[in-house]
Each structure stands twice: as C-alpha cells, then as structure tokens.
Image (cartoon, rainbow, N blue to C red):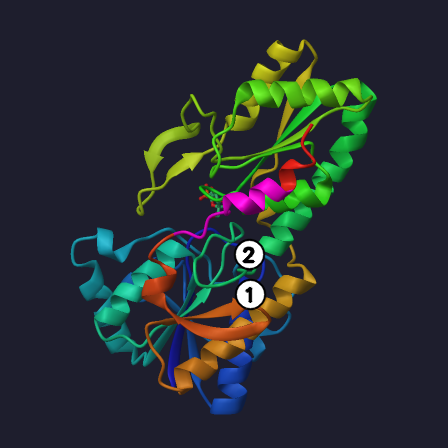
Amino acid sequence: MRIGILTGGGDCPGLNAVIRAVVRKGVEQHGDEVVGFRDGWRGVLDGDVVALDVAAVRGLLPRGGTVLGTSRTNPFALDGGPERVLATLERLGIEALVPIGGEDTLGVAARLGEHGVQVVGVPKTIDNDLEGTDYTFGFDTAVGVAMEAIDRLHTTGDSHHRTLVVEVMGRHAGWIALHAGMAGGANIVLIPERPFDVDAVVAHCLHRFESGYSPIVVVSEGARPADGDLVTSTGQADAFGHVRLGGIGAALAQLVEERTGREARAVVLGHVQRGGTPSQFDRVLATRFGLAAVDAVHDGASGVMVALRGTDVVRVPLAEATARLKLVPLERYAEAEVFFG
Ligand code: F6P
C-alpha cells in the first residue's frame, strides 16, 4: 500500500519513534511505500512530501521533535481546504493516511474519514488529555522533566526561604501538574479542572514556612482562581480557536509574596517539557502505536485511533476520541490534597 503519514499540532517526544515504527513494519513486513507530509495538514494541502524508506528512519527512535515538521494548520478552516486535501491524496495515490496528533489533528482526521479517506490516527500530546486512551506518549517525558525541575527547586527554595511557583503546560487539563506535583513532592498543585481559592493557597504556604521548609506550588497554565479569569499571553487564537496560555505563575507568585510577606518567584518550564529525547515509556508506547497503526491499515480499519487501554493497544473510534477532552477527575485530584500545606 501507499501510506501517508503526518505529525500535527504541538511537537512531543516520541513522534519520530512512531514514524520509524510505521516505516519499519510497513516496508519490511508488508512491502508498503510510506510518504511523509511536511508540517502536518499544511503539507497535505500543498502536496509537500518526503519519501520515507528504512534508511530515512535510521536513528530516529531517541530523537525528540518531529523530522516531518508540524503546524497547527486546519484544512477545514480554509476555503476549499478539504477539497485540496482530497485532491493531493488522489494525485499522490495515497491509499491510507496515518495522522499523528492530538484533538485538533485527529479531529480533522475524523472528518476526512467521513469523506471516504482511510484514516488511522495515532494519539500524541504531552497534555495527556485525549479521550479514549489511558496515556498518550510525550506525557511521561514531560512529567519527568517537570519532576526533575521540582526536585531542584526544593533545595534552592529552602536555602532562600522563598516560595517557588512552577508553571507547567497542559492547556485545559491538569495531568502534567498533578503527576509532576505528586512525583516531585509539591506542597500545592493547582489545575484547571478545580478553580483555586487564593486564601487557601496562602494558608498552605504559611503552614509550610512554619514547618521550616519553603513551599513549592505547581500551577497548570490553564488554572485560574475561583474569582478570576484565565491568564492568556496574547488574545490571539490559532486555527483551531485555542488562545495561548501562560502567565498564571507570575501572577500567583506576586499575590503569594504580597499575602505571605515573604519573597516568591515564578519558574515557567514552557517548551523544555516538550523538547528532547523521549523517556523509555514514551519510546515503547510510540513504537507500539506505530506498529498497531500499520496493522489497522492492513486490516482495512478506518475512522479509528490506536489507543492504550491498560497494557493493551486497541482501536477506538476517532469520533469518540475527539468528542471531548479527558480531564482530571476531581477524585484523582483529591488524592493529592492530603499533601497540601
Ligand atoms: O498541547 C501541547 C501544548 O504544549 C500545551 O500544553 C500548550 O498550551 C500548547 O501546546 C502550547 O503551544 P505552542 O507551543 O504552539 O504555543
């Protein structure tokens, strides 16, 4: 078969491992030809391709980012976009498409599936917010980076008797904050799913100082106070309507400093969480997803996404996986609250 592959949305560790697995299994076991589209759906719109043979994917397993490039292009937001996509696939003789992405990229895939394109999606995002899969690859690596940062911040915070507020990514889901906060022993974790009470944050910080240690507050970029708004860095939205988040860490540090009377600083981890080599968990998951996607293509499956359920890789309908975000259940958050203060 002639299979097209693309990576869309924010990059994340493990994308190259999927590309490698699709090519290795497709070419070596099925005699497929694999074509990579550059920069996500932009490459499909423009017919911008690169041939992917076994030599082209050598050494990709540990490499971060995506060798295909990525973009947040949405063909359905452009006049004649879907028609241009279909024309490219027809012209290049692409029989099946393997888009690797999050809710936006896979949302486009689901709609193309309805137009008769054979699509098998692969879920990725450091945010771990895709419904239908227990984990996305990239998440484990991002949590590892944030955990290491928190470990380091404990010692410098204690030395200077100051509060350190660590802002992590995650958009509207608090998974990175929750897992990094638990793994790093943070004293407070603030997530978008549960608007926070500033008085309670200040009280927890003061309690921590009283016990002889300095507070570490982990705040997800999408968290907001119960009586305040989401902090955004620009008012601009991308092609899928997402505004750029960021700034809650600095705003909160200022509030905590004023209210505790002790110095507070903000640390924004930002894209450090997304870059670099994938963890062993993400390498294995990404590889298993790539292999399973090729199997699904050859089984004639379409409109599906490969997904992790427990320890098994299964197929779930794309429509189901992209219908809503997988947010942190409040009972999961409540488990962590025993460590607050
Ligand atoms: O979805 C992954 C993610 O890293 C989010 O956590 C974050 O809000 C967003 O992408 C940032 O995107 P960009 O790098 O395009 O600003």
Q: CA distance from mark 2 to mark 1?
A: 7 Å
Task: Provide the secondary structure element on which disc 1 rests.
Answer: helix
- Residue 188 visible (yes or no): yes
Q: Which residue is mark 1?
A: 16
The verdict on residue 35 being magenta is no
Quarter of the picture containing the N terminus is bottom left
Q: Which residues are magenta?
A: 325-335
Q: Tell me the number on the disc at residue 134.
A: none
Which amino acid type is shown beneath numbered disc 2? Gly
Q: Residue at x 71, y 39 (%)?
A: 149
Which amino acid type is shown beneath numbered disc 1? Asn
- Residue 60 visible (yes or no): no
Q: What is the crowding at mark 2: few (fewer than 14 residues within 10 Å), some, or many (at least 20)?
A: many
Task: Provide the secondary structure element on which disc 2 rests.
Answer: loop
Quarter of the picture containing the C terminus is top right
The yes-or-no answer for disc 1 within 8 Å of ligand 1 is no
Q: Earlier in the sequence, mark 2 or mark 1?
A: 1
Q: Residue at x 64, y 48 (%)?
A: 143
Q: Is residue 313 left or right of residue 152?
A: left
Q: Which residue is mark 2?
A: 65
Q: Nearer the viewer, residue 149 or 134?
A: 134
216 w.r.t. 95: above or below: above
Do the residues bearing badges 2 and 1 touch, measured as CB atoms within 8 Å?
yes
The verdict on residue 333 being magenta is yes
**Residue 194 point in image, percent of width and height:** 49, 35
**Residue 239 point in image, percent of width and height:** 30, 46
